[in-house]
Image: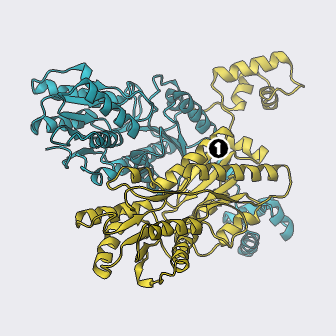
Chain colours: A yellow, B cyan
Amino acid sequence: MKPVTLKEIADQLNISVTTVSKALKDYPDISKKTKALVKELAQTLNYKPNAFAVNLRTKESKTIGLIIPEIVHHFFSSVIKGIVAQAEKKGYLVIILQSNESYELEKKQIQLLLRQRVDGILISLANGTADYNHLNDVLAQDKPLVMFDKIAKLVKCSKVIIDDRKAAYEATQHLIDTGCKRIAHFRGALLPQNSIDRFLGYKKALLDNNMPYDPSLVYICQCGDQSFEEGKMNARQLLKDHKDVDGIFINTDMVAIGAITEFNEQGIKIPEDISIVGFSNWFMSSVISPSLSTIDQPGYEMGKAAFKQLYKEMQQLKNKGPIVYKEIVLETALIKRQSTK
Amino acid sequence: MKPVTLKEIADQLNISVTTVSKALKDYPDISKKTKALVKELAQTLNYKPNAFAVNLRTKESKTIGLIIPEIVHHFFSSVIKGIVAQAEKKGYLVIILQSNESYELEKKQIQLLLRQRVDGILISLANGTADYNHLNDVLAQDKPLVMFDKIAKLVKCSKVIIDDRKAAYEATQHLIDTGCKRIAHFRGALLPQNSIDRFLGYKKALLDNNMPYDPSLVYICQCGDQSFEEGKMNARQLLKDHKDVDGIFINTDMVAIGAITEFNEQGIKIPEDISIVGFSNWFMSSVISPSLSTIDQPGYEMGKAAFKQLYKEMQQLKNKGPIVYKEIVLETALIKRQSTK
């Protein structure tokens, strides 16, 4: 059974398509009797208004686009949950696209979303993204765009972030306060702003405490995504390179769990031999043994705040007012567990 | 800057909108020179074809809908990844909606997707879904629909599943083979077919081995989603109710990890006192201590197979051929780890 059209309803009742359309929309120039007839038949035939046709008129698609590097990722999963919950409340559908940390794919997806005429776009950048023309394209079309978590400072739009530098500083300071003398850092990839900021927070904490900064203690993420395997690999390498390291600040919990697993397997005691602080407070961090001290990063709240800001901008656009960009910084917290003294 | 329209291009070149439209689509009745002029200007002005207008003509939206109970869930995250990867290859956008295990929300989302005129729908049912009219609505409109994982046997459409009963039988048999004499089952909610099938597999394995089936050893999921907390709660209750239980087959890994954590905290030795087998082979199951024996459930492959089947049906529909439904059963495997002897 094909979807029923206005024309079929009109034919069956022997009235015009315009009358059917007006009746369904309760126009005052249509008689009550006709309205009742049309609505009854529409219901009997299970008539659904064509979303595309409606959209052409209202210029709103009631969809937003969401581009994230990775769906299967504890932190982004929470962000998605926050966005979707909020979007549903306001009657928006969310088209979720995964960039796989690829700049090329991200660029293509932005074009797809613009062609699809979404009302707004939420994005967390791929690690590979170093050029921002595709994002400026969005803004040039007066299309609301909100970046979250992995942002580009150079793009002029709203952003929802945490203070990565401050949080990383706090994590490193906790290692120092609990007696660590030589602290390594497993950092993220080179480009993302949050990876840079966490590294800078680590470095500043060392220098503020009169501890030398040694670049050989910084392990850069080689693979695109930050994985369990990377944590194991870096931990193995660290044991070969630097027997004197007694603390590590690790860019994300998944990598930290890999490192803990490797140290457990090699008989290295945590925190007695090496203390570890992670970042993100993934649920599993409280369950593994030893449990992981980490920075709590509010994923669900970030998703919620990002959609709320986008919604605000979509309303500003609708009311023909100027779009007011905002930078929203969410609070983080240090969670102390067994992996530090 | 608003998106550029065909009319603006036509006005600037002093030609008709039809000519512009034809030029952009390489119609043979437009001169090469005009085509070149139009295309150059379109590029300069950053013209994007209006997806809705295009869709009204082709009747294809090149989007599909995906409804899943829960995005933040290791298994579904992998399924999503498989679907999205496959959809992108074929140029489809995926609109992902989360039903939160609610039948009401699921029904609403099906209507939303139909109004949005998606080309097809993939769905894994909410625990609360016991009525299938909303799904039959989809099929009545000749809209391809593929169910995966949590399916309804009564709905006549394609399905991608695993043999839950067989896998659960194998898990329970493994407990029996390793010496367990009194085996409990933490099952899922009452309605989902996979929760029923896993329970039936457990029961059949007991009976085939001449072990009595004791309903008081079956703990039913009380909350909507199967959580870590539920595992802890059931484990606590089991220790109060049945001191003689020496094995548990648990419906899903997350619940099993909760149970392991509770037993660890109470000093119960795994597998010496109680052996545990989970279901799904979540990545974390290999990392916790003791690591969890489980059934490997191929999430990524399931997502891939589900999209492939949907794509096949969308092509069948396009070619005006009949839609051929298929039931695809993917292989599972028992993974033996430290939580069983």
Q: Quadrant of the C terminus of chain A?
A: bottom left
Above-or-below relation of B313 to A121: above
Q: Position of residue B210 (x, y in %)?
A: 9, 23
The answer for which chain carries disc 1 is: A
Which quarter of the figure has residue A110? bottom right
Residue A7 as seen in the image, left or right of residue A340:
right
Give the left or right position of residue A102, taking residue B114 as reference. left
Circle 1: element type:
helix
Judging depth in this view, the residue of B1 and B62 nearest the camera is B1
Instruction: Rate crowding at label 1 as few (under 14), some (14 to 19) or many (20 or more) other CA atoms within 10 Å.
Output: many
Q: Quadrant of residue A53?
A: top right
Which corner quadrant holds the N terminus of chain A?
Answer: top right
- Residue underneath mark 1: A87
Q: Residue furthest top?
A: A33
Which residue is nearer to you in this view: A85 or A109? A85
Q: Name the residue type under label 1.
A: Ala
One can see residue A80 in this view: yes
Q: How many marks?
A: 1
Residue B227 can be seen in this image: no
The answer to which of A169 and B330 lies nearer the viewer is A169
At a point 64% along the width and 43% down the height, the residue shown is A86
Residue B94 placement (x, y as % from top left): 53, 49
For the point 82% across and 26% down, the residue is A26
| x, y percent for residue A22 | 82, 29
| Residue under the image location 62 percent in, 53 percent down | A65
Name the spot of residue B168 as percent of width and height, x first.
23, 35
